[in-house]
């Protein structure tokens, strides 16, 4: 796809940047104020996320077959999170956590295809837009439907009007977005046929894209990201780009060149590994473009997966590494995912972090990095700013991370984790440092730890219940 050429004024107008930016932050009370120091040198921010890529589905974590040279390079040059957690074991809630810093059980996105981003929440795109950022969303949205009139994807059209909440109504000014999954090759077609798949890529004006949709889906997405980045750089505007790849979510299809890289393996594995390598290639393309534009130094380039691998171990190619469980589980395999950050201005050489970190931490980290405080931001936040850890001033997380998904509840700190799979009736306890595979239940041996952690978890669940009742929004002020 050839980049679209805009003048600086045209681009800033299209991106909603300028004297009206504060007025365009539509959430009541969602006004951001920045420090003079941060205003002078605001970092660009990019969130890259894959769909159903397990902790073990990268070369740098020791996969025996997968070729991910660009992610491996990020791991060597940036910050590699060895305990990075998706905030849920399925996609939609994790995506909500990335944009709000709040667990989606606070605002009704309990699972995939459940709920939508409510208007009272302040998204990161809205907060950054008010600070003069160009904002763009590319790829999978899954936080609401994208059309009220045309049948689309899982819920789009008249059947899902009450869940209409597209990215362009949540702070994103440039969009190339699908509601949910698509095939990872020829994304608009049923795999192996010319039949339409039933999902569309939607632009910020509410129209469906019809051109340039053949071939590898990750490349198709990056074909829209690169022009956005170029235009922002040319306009001298800081930018926030959310790049949510569909790979390697089913239907998993790889193109001929990528299949050839895995000759001799079973077909399902070839397609799975091939589409991840194709995605990795696009990450490399993005990294090279940032360097070419001379903006890599002050760009925060984040990468993670939205949850663990699909399918049952032994029957599906995705790898959770040494961890128990997979997608839909609150065991480590369902929520511990690959996590990376490249930011040369703050991370001069390769480092590793073993402190528990999560997608919930994106919002407060970016806000502190930009030097912004949000007036009227719904409270509480569940994430913490990782900036002190990035700068070497923090080595232990000050509070544990809590999770809930359907009948499962869990909370974990730097060492211990309790998990219930029956709505809190019974709990297991694991030492995730000594026993990362969660094979030995210590609940009977250490009941005092279970009791202490349950107090924290019960208080968190009560807080989430209050949030769902609207109490956080009632506290919002100007």
Image (spheres, helix red, strand yellow):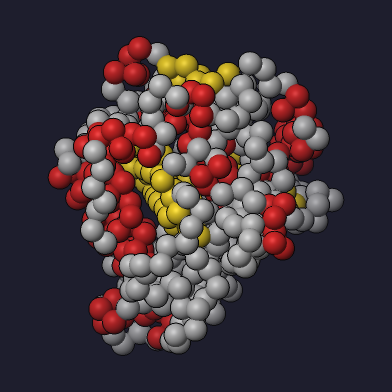
Could one spot residue 33 in this view of the protein? yes
Pinpoint residue 300: horizontal percent, then vertical percent: 33, 37
Q: Quadrant of the N terminus?
A: bottom left
Report the number of numbered marks.
0
Pinpoint residue 346: horizontal percent, then vertical percent: 28, 29
211 or 465, nearer to the observer: 211
The image quarter in which residue 399 lies: top right
Does 43 sit left or right of 102 as displayed? Answer: left
- In the depicted structure, whether residue 241 falls above or below residue 310: above
Q: What residue is at 62 percent from the left and 67 percent from the top?
A: 151
Does 206 sit left or right of 269 as displayed? Answer: right
Q: What residue is at 52 percent from the left and 47 percent from the top?
A: 167
Pinpoint residue 395: horizontal percent, then vertical percent: 44, 29
Q: Quadrant of the C terminus?
A: top right
Q: What residue is at 48 percent from the left and 46 percent from the top?
A: 84
Does 81 sit left or right of 320 as displayed? Answer: left
- Residue positioned most to the top: 36
323 or 228, nearer to the observer: 228
Q: What residue is at 51 percent from the left and 29 percent from the top?
A: 24
Does 342 sit left or right of 445 as displayed? Answer: left
The image quarter in which residue 351 lies: top left
């Amino acid at each position: 796809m050839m980049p679209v050429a805009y003048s600086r004024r045209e681009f800033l107008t299209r991106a909603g940047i300028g004297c009206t930016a504060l007025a365009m932050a539509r959430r009541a009370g969602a006004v951001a104020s920045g420090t003079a120091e941060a205003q002078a040198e605001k970092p660009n921010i990019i969130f890259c996320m894959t769909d159903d890529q397990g902790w073990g589905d990268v070369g740098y974590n020791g996969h025996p077959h997968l070729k991910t040279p660009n992610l491996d390079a990020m791991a060597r040059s940036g910050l590699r999170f060895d305990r990075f957690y998706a905030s849920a074991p399925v996609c939609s809630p994790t995506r909500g956590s990335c944009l709000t810093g709040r667990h989606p059980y606070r605002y009704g996105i309990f699972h995939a295809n459940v709920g939508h981003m409510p208007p009272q929440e302040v998204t990161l795109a809205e907060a950054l837009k008010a600070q003069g950022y160009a904002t763009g969303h590319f790829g999978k949205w899954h936080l609401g439907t994208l059309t009220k009139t045309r049948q689309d994807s899982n819920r789009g059209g008249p059947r899902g009007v009450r869940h209409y909440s597209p990215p362009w109504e949540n702070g994103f000014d440039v969009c190339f977005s699908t509601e949910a999954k698509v095939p990872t090759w020829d994304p608009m077609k049923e795999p192996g046929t010319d039949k339409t798949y039933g999902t569309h890529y939607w632009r910020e004006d509410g129209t469906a894209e019809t051109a340039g949709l053949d071939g590898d889906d990750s490349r198709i997405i990056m074909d829209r990201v690169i022009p956005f980045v170029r235009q922002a750089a040319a306009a001298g505007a800081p930018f926030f780009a959310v790049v949510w790849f569909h790979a390697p979510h089913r239907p998993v299809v790889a193109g001929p060149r990528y299949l050839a890289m895995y000759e001799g393996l079973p077909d399902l594995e070839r397609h799975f590994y091939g589409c991840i390598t194709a995605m990795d290639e696009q990450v490399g393309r993005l990294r090279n473009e940032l360097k070419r534009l001379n903006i890599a130094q002050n760009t925060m380039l984040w990468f993670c997966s939205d949850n663990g691998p699909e399918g049952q171990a032994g029957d599906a190619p995705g790898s959770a590494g040494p961890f128990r469980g997979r997608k839909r589980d609150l065991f480590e395999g369902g929520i511990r995912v690959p996590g990376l950050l490249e930011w040369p201005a703050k991370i001069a050489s390769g480092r590793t972090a073993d402190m528990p970190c999560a997608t919930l931490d994106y919002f407060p980290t970016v806000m502190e990095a930009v030097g912004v405080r949000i007036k009227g931001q719904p409270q509480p936040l569940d994430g913490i700013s990782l900036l002190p850890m990035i700068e070497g001033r923090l080595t232990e997380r000050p509070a544990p991370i809590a999770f809930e998904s359907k009948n499962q509840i869990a909370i974990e700190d730097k060492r211990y984790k309790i998990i219930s799979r029956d709505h809190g009736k019974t709990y297991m306890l694991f030492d995730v440092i000594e026993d990362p595979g969660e094979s030995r239940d210590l609940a009977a041996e250490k009941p005092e730890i279970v009791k202490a952690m349950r107090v924290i978890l019960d208080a968190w669940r009560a807080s989430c219940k209050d949030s769902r009742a609207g109490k956080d929004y009632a506290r919002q002020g100007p």
